[in-house]
Image (cartoon, helix red, strand yellow):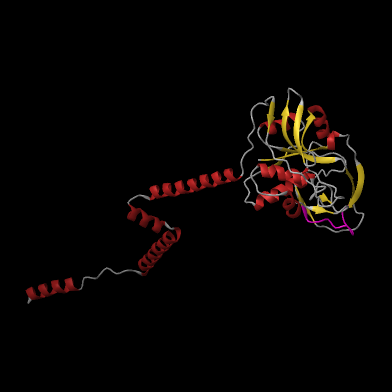
Amino acid sequence: MEENRQSGGSNAGSAQRPKKRVTRKQLRRRRIGGLIVLLVIIFLLSSGCASCIRCACGSGGNSEEDTSSTTGTISSSAVTSRTVTESVMPAETLVPDLPSSHQIDVTAINQKPELPTGDEITSLAMVLQHLGYDVNKEILARDYLKCAERGEATFSQAFIGSPFEEDGMGCFAPVVVDAAQRYISSQGGGKNVKTLNADNFEDVLLRVASDYPVLVWINRNLELRKEEYCFTVYSGGSVTMPAVTTAPAAGFTGTGVSSDTAAETTTSTVSLGTSKQDVYWIPNATCVVLTGYDMDNGTVTVIDPLQGEVTYEMGMFKTSYNALYKQAVIIY
């Protein structure tokens, strides 16, 4: 009995040994810990770390190679883009030194009878044809030259009148630059149009020596400049400025020439007399193409839209160039 009691007591003690209980505090800690782990996993997924880990495992550590490959592709595209840009917009290439003489073969175009007052646009047609464009003076005058009536704009903003008419007046370099840019853009671009405004006449000759025919404004037959009052342009009121975008006219400081230094488009109408500008014109002004020079003989060669090829004394030509505000235009 005693033995059974002891055995029974032993079994009972073994059976009744209390199990380890989880307290509420421990349960709360476990739940909080699990929540923290879950939040960490969610954070890693949202920040892309899990994706990075999968890539590293799947690619065997090739992520750096992939990055290098991508970078190389971008660099190649950037180089290609730069190459295309440079090919579309070439740089002006000048000879290092001014040789004693040079001559460019430019085919003469007569402005008459179609354009009795269109020397500027005819000279532009000569240069564009020399560059290989299949264009004629009438298309340039009709479709690309901005024209305005007297009192609507200055000679640096538009051709005043019409080059198709005997009473047409003319324009200055910014208008020809604009016409050239508009035409070249219509043909897909690829050329720059530049106003020289060269104080040193040798800079103009340097362009000729570099095979760039130069459009130059002079007095016809190198006569003395004849400047006269033409009209007044008002800023508003009953006079409405046309939608004309002008190229920079910096350097043109003569009377009656716009001194604006930034391109602008004007279509304003305000009170008449708010501001006004007296505009002067030079009736014997003309635009020719400078195609050659000879320092030893002291001469220059031009193609005049009215007279064809003409040779002038270099000093007198330079004086006339200065009198017309040193206006010169090249295309390259």
The N terminus sits in image quarter: bottom left
Give the residue at the far bottom of this rendering. Answer: 1
Task: Give the left or right position of residue 145, taking residue 77 as reference.
Answer: right
Residue extent of the magenta highlight: 234-244
Magenta stretch: helix, strand or loop mostly: loop
Give the residue at the far top of this rendering. Answer: 296
Q: Nearer the viewer, residue 253 or 125?
A: 125
Residue 231 rendering spot, x and y as whole percentages: 91, 49
Residue 201 rendering spot, x and y as whole percentages: 76, 30
Q: How many marks?
A: 0
Q: Nearer the viewer, residue 327 or 214?
A: 214
The C terminus sits in image quarter: top right
- The answer to which quarter of the image holds residue 287 is top right
Task: Give the left or right position of residue 325, taking residue 49 as reference.
Answer: right
- The answer to which quarter of the image holds residue 86 is top right
Residue at image location 79% in from the left, 36% down from the top: 326
Residue 195 rendering spot, x and y as whole percentages: 73, 40
- The answer to which quarter of the image holds residue 91 is top right
Give the residue at the far front of this rendering. Answer: 113
236 within the magenta span: yes
Q: Is residue 86 above or below residue 14?
A: above
Residue 325 rendering spot, x and y as whole percentages: 82, 37
Residue at image location 62% in from the left, 46% down from the top: 190
70 within the magenta span: no
